[in-house]
Image (tube, helix red, strand yellow):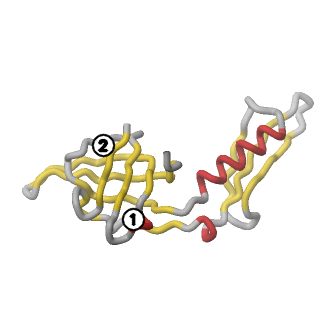
Amino acid sequence: KSIKHRIGWNVVSADNLKLRKADDVKVQVQFEFKKSTGEAVTISAGTPGGVVKKQTISIVSDTKKLKEIAEAALKKETYDGYEGSYTGFLIPFVQNGYRASLYDKKYPERQGNYFVESVETTYGQSGGRRDVQIGVKLSDI
């Protein structure tokens, strides 16, 4: 499901959103698999010298497909957009796995679709609030 949050309208606070630039992130994604002979083959994508994210995979043994998977995993790690969390009202309803479409009139660069990783709902004297933790930026479809 998809929900729309407009900062300054149905979002109380967006102070915990941090800008993330793909050029600033140095990540190297490595996938390793073992051939039937026992030989380990490592396929990597990204910038050497950065944070290394290693995974062992046993399903795919074709190096061409494995390179495509590594490139897709790298795209997930490096994107231009925001990361962090924001606080919204109880409406619209949102939960883990939703797509949050953020919109901001003041800062249009914040606009985008993000994967909702977690939601914490709290109630108090000032009403109910949802703290929405966003993850990777989704393609704009």
Q: Are marks 2 and 1 in contact (CB under 8 Å)?
A: no
**Could you say which is closer to the camera, residue 114 or residue 52?**
114
Location of mark 2 (residue): 94
In the rendered image of this protein, does residue 1 appear above or below residue 104? Answer: above
- Helix, strand or loop at label 1? It is strand
Q: Is residue 96 left or right of residue 73?
A: left
User: Could you classify mark 1 by the number of other residues whose Cα lies within 10 Å: few (under 14), some (14-19), or many (20 or more)?
Assistant: some
Quarter of the figure with the N terminus: top left
Location of mark 1 (residue): 17
Q: Residue 97: x, y in percent?
A: 41, 39
Q: Residue furthest left?
A: 125
Question: Which residue is drawn at the image coordinates 60% and 65% (left, top)?
Answer: 22
User: Could you classify mark 2 by the number of other residues whose Cα lies within 10 Å: few (under 14), some (14-19), or many (20 or more)?
Assistant: many
Say what amino acid the circle numbered 2 marks: Val
In the rendered image of this protein, does residue 15 appear above or below residue 74? Answer: below
In the rendered image of this protein, does residue 64 appear above or below residue 128? Answer: above
Question: Which residue is drawn at the image coordinates 30% and 43% (left, top)?
Answer: 94
Question: Which residue is drawn at the image coordinates 20% and 47% (left, top)?
Answer: 90
Q: Is residue 69 left or right of residue 139?
A: right
Q: Earlier in the sequence, mark 2 or mark 1?
A: 1
Q: Residue furthest right?
A: 37
Q: Residue 9: x, y in percent?
A: 22, 60
**Could you say which is closer to the camera, residue 37 or residue 102?**
102
Question: Which residue is drawn at the image coordinates 24% and 45% (left, top)?
Answer: 92
Say what amino acid the circle numbered 1 marks: Leu
- Helix, strand or loop at label 2? It is loop
> What is the distance, in whole Å, between disc 2 and disc 1 at their CAs?
17 Å
Q: How many marks?
A: 2
Residue 66: numbered disc: none
Q: Is residue 65 left or right of residue 136?
A: right
In the rendered image of this protein, does residue 61 appear above or below residue 102? Answer: above
